[in-house]
Amino acid sequence: MEYVIEMLGIRKQFGDFVANDNVTLQLEKGEIHALLGENGAGKSTLMNVLFGLYQPEAGDIKVKGESVRITDPNKANQLGIGMVHQHFMLVEKFTVTENIILGSEPTKMGLINIRKAAKKIQELSIQYGLDVDPYAKIQDISVGMQQRVEILKTLYRGADILIFDEPTASLTPQEIIELIQIMKRLVAEGKSIILITHKLKEIMEVSDRVTIIRKGQGIGTVTTSETNPDELAEMMVGRQVIFKTEKTVGIPKEEVLRVENLTVKDNRGIERVKNLNLSVRAGEIVGIAGIDGNGQSELIEAITGLRKATGGSVTLKGKDITSMKPRGITEAGTGHIPQDRHKHGLVLDFSIGHNIALQSYYHKPISKNGIIDYKEVNSFASKIIDEFDVRTPGIHTEARALSGGNQQKAIIGREISRDPDLLIAALPTRGLDVGAIEFIHRRLIEQRDKGKAVLLISFELDEVMNVSDTIAVIHDGSIIDTVNPQNTTEQKLGLLMAGQTLHTKQDKAGDE
Amino acid sequence: MSKRWISLLIPVVSIILGLLIGAIVMLATGFNPVDGYIALVNGMVGDSYNLGETIRTITPYVFAGLAVAFAFRTGLFNIGVEGQLIMGWLAAAYVGYAFDLPPVLHVIVAILAAAIAGGLWAFIPGLLKAKLQVHEVIVTIMMNYIALHVVNATIDTLSDGKEKTETIHTSASLGSEFLQSLTDYSRLHWGFAVALLAVLVMWFILEKTTRGYELKAVGFNQNAAEYSGMNVSKNIILAMVISGMFAGIGGAMEALGTFGNIMKMTAFSGIGFDGIAVALLGANQPLGVLFGAILFGALKNGGLNMPNEAGVPVEIVSIVIALIIFFVASGYLIQLILNKLVKKDTKTPKVDKKNVKGEK
């Protein structure tokens, strides 16, 4: 068997801490090789070793059969290793071509030959079916397209081995399908791919083999066709994982949230939510399924008071809360786990303790006569941290320093602890690993079982199917159908999300 | 913990480096640095008169520094401290001579007038920022020029074309015969006590009050503040106004303490701008600002003694001050680079460690 890359028995240590120990990864030519592990299992460390950012303490790296020492990223580039980063490194105001040649501009007497570069990029784009316009500006193209620019960047520099770092994290389901096709095309053209991910579904769909790391230890390599998601999850986490969150049948009671003919415009004045109707009852989880950008964000913002509705009404327990200020709506009995935890959910520069007090800092017992009793803040925060299993060195640690899962647990703890009648959870598990996802799903169901209403917004079909009692499908700003998860399939939902109603087979394609 | 030590260490090292290079400059230009620095120290604390004058010089710097630091801590860059300060100066001087009030009350009213004037001057950029997203740096800079000319024109009107306003009544004066007799008739006044109080007030607002929590939250992340139900516009305006009030009271110290009036200015007093440096030296912490102002004021006042006693030009002190600020600023830079280097090496394990302990 011909290996293009062999990492044999890699050990990387930082002080006393062993980030990688005895990890072996062998990449065959023309395969898609997944590297699986939980957040913080040591995937990035291993790839940084391969990319020359870290030097291993032990182990061997062979490229095309020859032992090499990769001392820096330039060396990695020379060896034909390219990295498609999770967070794109692109200049918004530059064109695709300008971004791709950045750092290795083809110059002649100080002049750049953009046209020549653009031509080469065009050729590469056609060869690999990337469909990228070399003259488009980054700020004008979609996230999926930007990722293809990152792929082109590595190809332009002559990479044969492409490392994809969590490539689907910020993509829509459609874009994920396109990306998978692109990856298959790349290997068909003779490239080899290492795919870093913790999403089992993608691994099953796209990879040839999987190498699993757990807590820095190499667990082993398996052939994808000979394994299944349950086995992979167990190897990754080290215990059995329940995917299908256990829950009893919900007993919905009285209506808590009622949205009638709601219309909301976005910042550019475009109507994003159009005459939307929705109802959530106590003791029920309603999941909103839909492709990103169909009005979900605007809907939540309008319900929670962060955005003004231009028409229609929102009623909470019979009380009209349309166009009330966020605080009024919160106090009327709403908890909100926001879509973007860094933008809305946390003050990253505050300590985690201060963040946990973000919804209660102004009333008793924390605040008395305009003075905050920080002892109360601390004891309240400690309670939440214990109860919701937030792993942090202490309550005074900056929120920024916590992992995404723990940040999210803190937010969820903060919102649930106020015991809201309506809990809105927007993409509550985005970017989290299976352990944290399991925890969060259990908490949502717990709220439901306590007789609270839960509104879940998610782009992940699995999540919506698993957690909700009722699924409302949103398309182009309206709820086009409401289905029972027991009586539907992912395929049916997918069609609905693309705008096709099940009754009429009219072809209304999605907006992208 | 170590972070705290580093932020303490940087100014100290910067001062030493600044003085060292200052000495080299003196040597290179043919002066004796030992004599120069002895003269500097004598000018600061050599006798009771100099000590009094030094404390007097420090006082307005404390306010200017607090004004800049307060704005910074709430996410704003108040470059308009100078303008707010001279508006406060004018207001205090006017109230000081135009009103007849009982002694202590008169001082309080005059200081309040200065606070209101400074606060109003900062309200305008605050309002523009909160409602129209106009960047406060530009507006506050321009407001400085408007203040300068408004002050000069007002003095002109009030004094029928003279160069300065009438002297304030003694009932409005911060001056004290007791303090003067103690310091060989320097211009030392009670302002330093007001300044110490102001340091306490800033600490209290930011660290103890509910409002302070909101102001800081809005400064760090407006979106999260809005999400949690805070009124973002109101907090931005309030932050700016409080900052301006500190500046305005700084002006009152000059009007009611040092000068007893306000005179036409051909250029800015410079105190407001030096406030930026003081805040930087003090790492935007109330107590830090106090020490920054002490250093600044002491160097400024002590430097005046260098030409007399050692024949060293006073500009040397300006060079030393500039060097210290340079090192403090680049000290943060050095710290930043160090942190980055350290982070690069430990980033991954840090995350890993948590998870290893974390996920069972």
Image: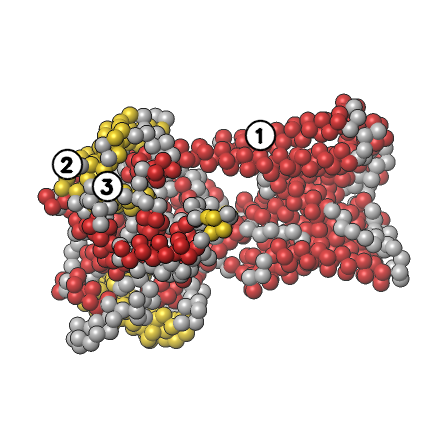
**Dot label at residue B9:** 1
Distance from disc 2 to disc 1, alpha carbons, whole Å, reads 59 Å
The image quarter in which residue A469 lies = bottom left
Q: Which residue is nearer to you in this view: A263 or A303?
A: A263
Q: Amino acid at mark 1?
A: Leu
Residue underneath mark 2 = A1
Q: Amino acid at mark 2?
A: Met
A426 left or right of B334 in image: left
Sequence-wise first label, 2 or 3: 2
How was the colour assigned to the protein in this rendering? secondary structure
Marks 2, 3: nearer the viewer:
2
Residue B263 appears at what percent x and percent y? 83, 52
Residue underneath mark 3 = A35
Local SS, label 1: helix
Residue drawn 77% across the image and 39% down it: B56
The reply to the same-chain question for discs 2 and 3 is yes
Q: Which residue is nearer to you in this view: A271 or A470?
A: A271
Q: Residues within 10 Å of mark 3 (few under 14, many from 20)?
A: many
